[in-house]
Amino acid sequence: MKIVLNLPFNGCPPNPAFVSQEAIMGLCATAEEAGFGGVSLTEHPAPSEAWRQAGGHDALDPFVGLAFAAAATKKIRLFTYLIVLPYRNPFLAAKSAASLDALSNGRLELGLGAGYLKSEFFALGVKFEERNELFDESIRVMKMAWTGEPVTYDGKHFSAKGVTSQPRPAQRNPHPPLWIGGNSQMAQRRVAEQAQGWLAMPSTPDQAKNRRSVALQTLKDMEAVINGIKAHAKSIGRKEPFSVMYPLGGGHSGDETPAGQVAFCKSLSELGVNWASFHTHADTLAGLKDEIKRAGDELISKLPK
């Protein structure tokens, strides 16, 4: 199992000490030295103040932040965990993803979600009610754009005639890995049909209702979703395996001592989970780096390779 460091944008407003080139690059370099397999950033380009004050969080633009992460590291994977795909024109999303993948020598892991904040959709001029149609159509368009060949497309939301997008992503087998976030039947279908990974979203029933998703609280819940994805994959003839990521901490993983997290990760691994994400809590750069180093010593080094 590999561990991803969620870069420290978990509240609002963001800690000014973390919003700098030195902070992002220093934390990512420390994470790579400690054995982390990836770093991640999410997004909220236009969150409402009501949501922020009710427990939401601010965020960097993930492509910009991960570009700094790429510049400070050599091997660590770069996760958008996740971008809300309906917010973006798919040609622009494809261009951002291809640019980051090319400049990082093929290290992008593109996590995608359909979104749930009506106020943010409204602020961005995107129809909330059409988010699922936008999501599926955008994936089709991005995959076409990444071929580097002229794209002619006429869909419900997007059209293009002889449009070419270069440079291509560095990963061409056939494109950067796509991860789908969410627990619903629709998310499971998308993982099986369109993606290379599933981003689990632990949620209580109340949280799931707010996120317009499905509750996910136990290992049995995880097993049920993984089996659901496998069943649909088999029904459509898919033979390629898919990756799974689960977030540690936040009360979702039980005993949050190092030994407890090691044991929990081993239980997840038995279900087929091969990535876990790790949150830090310190409020200083020095404290964050200490947490990252301890995680390397007390968690990552103890996990099966």
Image (tube, helix red, strand yellow):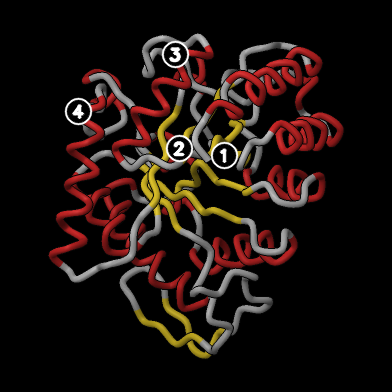
Labels 1 and 4: the sequence-earlier one: 1
User: Residue 257 got which mark?
Assistant: none
Q: Assess disc 2: are there few (<14), some (14-19) or many (≥20) residues with their C-alpha within 10 Å of its C-alpha.
A: some
Q: Secondary structure at mark 4?
A: helix
Please tell me whether residue 128 is drawn above or below residue 5 in the rendered image: below
Query: Residue beneath label 1, please?
Result: 45
Q: Are marks 1 and 3 in contact (CB under 8 Å)?
A: no
Quadrant in the rendering for residue 42: top right
Q: Say left or right for 131 vs 164.
A: left
Label 4 crowding class (10 Å Cα cut-off): few <14, some 14-19, many 20+? few
Name the spot of residue 210 as percent of width and height, x first. Answer: 29, 25
Q: Are marks 1 and 2 in contact (CB under 8 Å)?
A: yes
Query: Which residue occupies 63% across, 61% down?
Result: 96
Measure how far apart labels 1 and 4 are at the Cα level: 34 Å
- Identity, as a three-letter code, of the amino acid under mark 2: Glu
| Mark 1 or 2, nearer chain start | 1
| Residue occupied by mark 4 | 220
Are the residues tagged 1 and 4 within 8 Å (C-beta)?
Answer: no
> Residue 136, position in %: x, y?
32, 62
| Disc 3 target residue | 260
Question: Residue at (43%, 72%) from the top-left corner?
Answer: 141
Q: Which residue is mark 2?
A: 120
The quadrant in which residue 57 appears is top right
Residues at marks 4 and 3, CA–CA distance in whole angstroms: 18 Å
Q: CA distance from mark 1 to mark 3?
A: 35 Å
| Residue in the image at 38% along x and 34% along y | 117
Q: Residues within 10 Å of mark 1 (few under 14, many from 20)?
A: some
Kind of residue indicated by mark 1: Pro
- Can you say whether 180 is above or below 264 in the image? below
115 shown above or below 179 = above
> SS at mark 1?
loop
